[in-house]
Image (cartoon, helix red, strand yellow):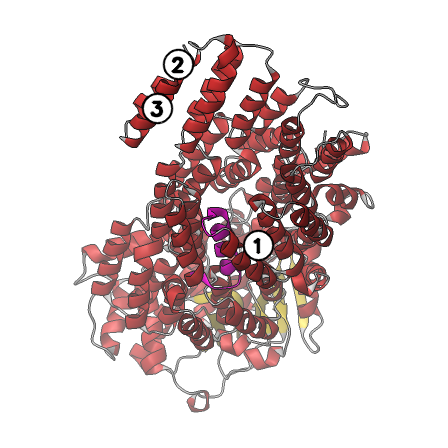
Amino acid sequence: MTPPEMTETLKRAEARFRAGARAEAVALVQAAVTRQAPERIVLFARKADALLTRHGERRAALACVSAACRACPGRQDLDLLRVAGLLRLGRTPEAAAALSGLFAPSDKAAPAAYWRYLAQVSLARGEMARASDILARARALGHDDAVLRGLGIRALMAEDPPEALAQARQAQAAFPDHAGLTLQLIRAERAALGPAAARALAEQALERFPEGVTFHLELADILRSLGAPLAARERLELAARCDPRSPLPAVQMALLHLAEGDPRAALAAAEQAETLGRDLPRVELTLATCLEAAGQPEAALARREALFDRGQAGPSGIRDLIKAHLARGDLAAVSRYLAAGQEMFPGHPVLVEQMLRNSGLTEEDFPAGQLTDWLAGCLPAPRLRRLRAEMRLTAFDFAGALTELRRIPVAERDVQYAVLAAKALLFSNRLSVAMRYLRMSLSVWPSDMRLAALVVATFTKAGQERAGLALLQQAAQRRPEGATSLARHRIKLHASLGEFDAALAAFRIALGCEAARMRPETHALLRELAAQGHGEIVATVLREARAAGVWDDPHLHKTLLGQNMTELTIALFDFEKGPLRPLPPGDTAGHITLVQAEPDSNIAAMRFLKHWQAHLQAVPDALPARPRIPRCIFQYWNTLEPPEALVGMIESWRAVPGWQHRLFDRRAALAYLHDTYGTDWARAFSLASNPAEESDFLRLCLLAREGGVYADADDVLVGSLETLVDRGAGFVALLEPGRSIIGNNFLAATPGHLIAELAAKTAREALLARANETTWSKTGPSMLGRATARCLAHWAKTGTPADVAFLGFEDIFGQLAIHNRVPHKRQAGDWRQGAYSRKSVPFARVLQEQLLRQSAGSDFAA
């Protein structure tokens, strides 16, 4: 092909691209590659690569260059052009292999591009120190251009931000008109001095480079981090106008929508990015993230696996694959991708963090200094400081997490720090401090979804739902554009307070943008609506949720939530006569009939509990005098020695002055039941499916016969036990938020109390019958609620004063800490978690293998 023919071919391909005939343009260029004479093939390959890359056909560009390499083997300039294409596509391992052997380490003939690509490979692998060494060798050989200096600044930025800033200023002075170095200066200033300082620099840079799309993108990200999403969105729109062919503004817009809790808008932006840059790994990874957030996990997983199969996943893509398979419980796939990640990107910070977060291990689990020394070589100091706190949280060492967080410099305390600190305070039951900290944090980051979720959890646990709701409403007023994203988190609070109009409004707002995440909130809303007998609204919410895909999970029916939804659906089949039948407010006779007609219905029990509290509950002074709760505390742990994490919790009960304490294990429980109740009762206990059912059954038997207090082994007494149990009633129980479900983790009763006896007999029958129900329904809170409702209905019908007192979370605040995070709740035997305990095994194993190799002298960065 002559030079004029080559030029004409490229012009025709450009015309095809402009006409929208992309496939024809690509085919035209690819067909022309091998028709070039050897002396012109390099020139054509460069021009074809530039043309195809400019139009977003990066894979086709790489194919053209690879064909040229095959046609003209041994041409180092072509090999380097191919490496550039591999790096653009994120195919780092292939790029490293292609660079291997091209030049000797001290070869003065190696061009600057070789050193540049070699450094880029190390940066992509997270090997910052090695990248710095490569660039130092390049300088020693006389290479000192703006691009190499920019790579050196990148290598330093994570390790030593002040030094990176100093070098960036020097480089910018040497190359004042180089846009890439100006961008690195902005990033170095942000890393060293914070986003506010970088914002001014970015705005100045845009005055010099007004059409520079990367500066608009950088400023948008700075604005987002400063809590100005509206300004960030405007800046991204400007970036898109500056370069309509770049997919990066749409990628960043998608991530901004995700941060604001709008996955549908995020998915639309990601799909737009794909039309502009379908070959870019960043585009594919963002699209997969948005698909997952929009409730399409299978489509997201398919894209991630396709990216991995093409060698484009990179460390972030492999991390996302590990997380996706971990959520599916596919530990074989987790192990496979963990091994691949460590082979392709050994010691990369992204994969190291993933491994450590999920291993359940801390630095104390290894010989002194071993893990610390390795991490110091893998992770920048700021990331390492934060990771140490996360590891403590994962290992249930909440006090240790708070200690690590206090060591983090103030300059590094961003919204992610705030989330970790709020979690550590919540999990360590420092609720008053946690509520104050969340008030402060939400004033700075009012639309952050993680903080909003922690507000719901913290204020609910403290019995302060109304205060938590007020805080979220203030955040929405402070940041109106983020109000939609906060709607989902208001649903539970409105529902538990009985504010159903507001709850439904928030439900419909949230349903429009994040239906895939709304399963827990929808369940809470339906439960409270059913407890108040709003059957028609229940039917509407179920229908709208189903249409939006809230229940799209093939395994939902196996879960407690799925079984509750099934009960609601069945109740609606016989709406006029079933447990959701319409009843006038205050109709005590109707509610009594409902419970007697539906003794096995959770819905009927919840409705009666709500009715009794609203219309029949007497004030304590009006009740006749009752016998005092016996001063004996019972607890259960199935083995002889409780786990270390529970020892201090159990001690909080054993140390109560004036109270006897008895801790049963499985053998002692069986002996007690056999000697006190007989063979059938002991057999029922032995038929329990898990330790939770054993504990549920034993507590009812103990309270029915002996009277006293039962507390779960992972509850902590922090105040006065007498304040909790001396309520002038023979049965004291805790109501969960919404006050329609009785929690059974803390109970008190006098001997022979009707509720305890009926509940014990009901649990025994279910165990002996080997009922195919969840633990919650067979022996746990649901069963206790049904037994309590039947007793209350009997007392109401006969005019007998109800011998019961209910506590709310506001009553136990400062007295009793429940629902604590402890390791056994994530073990295979726990009824909540299935096989969760095995999920940490692959991570711990790979981590230990890494450290073993290091101790044997292996170089992880090689």
The segment highlighted magenta reads: 210-229
Between marks 1 and 3 in the image, the one whose residue lies nearer the viewer: 3
Q: Which mark is residue 674?
A: 1
Front residue of this view, candidates 267 and 14: 14
Q: Quadrant of residue 141?
A: top right
Earlier in the chain: of badge 1 and badge 3, it is: 3
User: What is the residue that sits farthest to the left in this orientation?
Assistant: 576
Mark 2 or 3, nearer chain start: 3
Whether residue 114 is visible, yes or no, is yes
Instruction: Check disc 3 and give the amino acid type.
Output: Lys
What is the secondary structure assignment of the residue under circle 3?
Answer: helix
| 662 magenta-colored | no
Residue placed most toward the observer, 519 or 277: 277
In the displayed structure, 462 sits above or below 777; it is below
Q: Nearer the viewer, residue 527 or 596?
A: 527
Instruction: Identify which residue is drawn at 63% across, 79% down.
Output: 720
Between disc 2 and disc 3, the foreground one is 3
Upstream in sequence: badge 2 or badge 1: 2
Q: Residue at x 81, y 30 (%)?
A: 857
